[in-house]
Amino acid sequence: MSRNYYELTYIISPVLEDDEYDKIVEKFTELIRDNGGEIDEVDEWGIRKFEYEMDDKSSGYYVNAYFTAPGELIEKLERALRIDDQIMRYLTLKYDAKMMRHREQQRKGTVPNVFVEENDEEEEEDED
C-alpha cells in the first residue's frame, strides 16, 4: 500500500460557535488517523473574508492540514467532506517531489523570498 503526502484545505461555514469549529477539525483529523494517515500539521487560519460571496456567505473558517496517507483514504475523506453540511469547499493536493522540497523549506524556515517588498521598491526609486 503506497503512502503519499497530501495537503487538504477546507472552508467551514462561518456561522458556528468556536467549540463547533474545534469539533469539525477534530472529526476530520480523526478520520485521517483512523484510516491509516499520519497528521503532520493542522493549521487553522480562522475566519477569512471572501472576494466573492459563496453559498450566500461573505466569509468562512479556513483549515489547512498536511498529512501522509494511503491513496484509498482520499476518496473516503472527500466523501465525508462533501456530505458534511458545514463544509463549504475543500481542496486536496497530492504532493510531488518539487512540492515536498518546498514543504521541507517551509518547515526549516528557509523558503526564499521571490517577491520584492513594496518598501524595497520605493527605497530603490528614491536612490535613483
Image (cartoon, grey):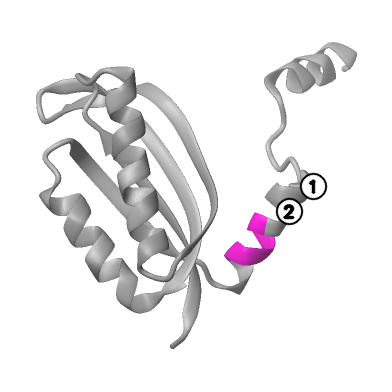
Q: Secondary structure at mark 1?
A: loop
Where the N terminus falls, by quadrant? Answer: bottom left
Measuring 16% from the left and 22% from the top, which residue is drawn there? 57
- Please count the marks in the image: 2
The residue closer to the viewer here, 29 or 43, is: 29
Mark 1 lies on residue: 110
The magenta segment: 99-103
Residue 79 position within the rendered picture, expressed as x and y whole percent measured from the top left = 17, 60
Q: Residue at x 31, y 68 (%)?
A: 74
Q: What quarter of the picture does the C terminus occupy?
A: top right
Circles 2 and 1: CB atoms closer than 8 Å: yes
Question: What is the quadrant of residue 99 in the picture?
Answer: bottom right
Q: Residue furthest top?
A: 126
Eyeballing the image, is 53 above or below 2? Answer: above
Task: Name the residue carrying label 2.
Answer: 105
- Amino acid identity at mark 1: Thr
SS label for mark 2: helix
Q: Is residue 49 visible?
A: no
Residue 122: which quarter of the image?
Answer: top right
Q: Nearer the viewer, residue 54 or 82?
A: 82
Q: Alpha-carbon neighbours of circle 2 within 10 Å: few (<14), some, or many (≥20)?
A: few
Q: Is residue 101 magenta?
A: yes
Q: Is residue 127 left or right of residue 76?
A: right
Give me the residue at 45% from left, 66% from top: 37
- Give amino acid for label 2: Gln
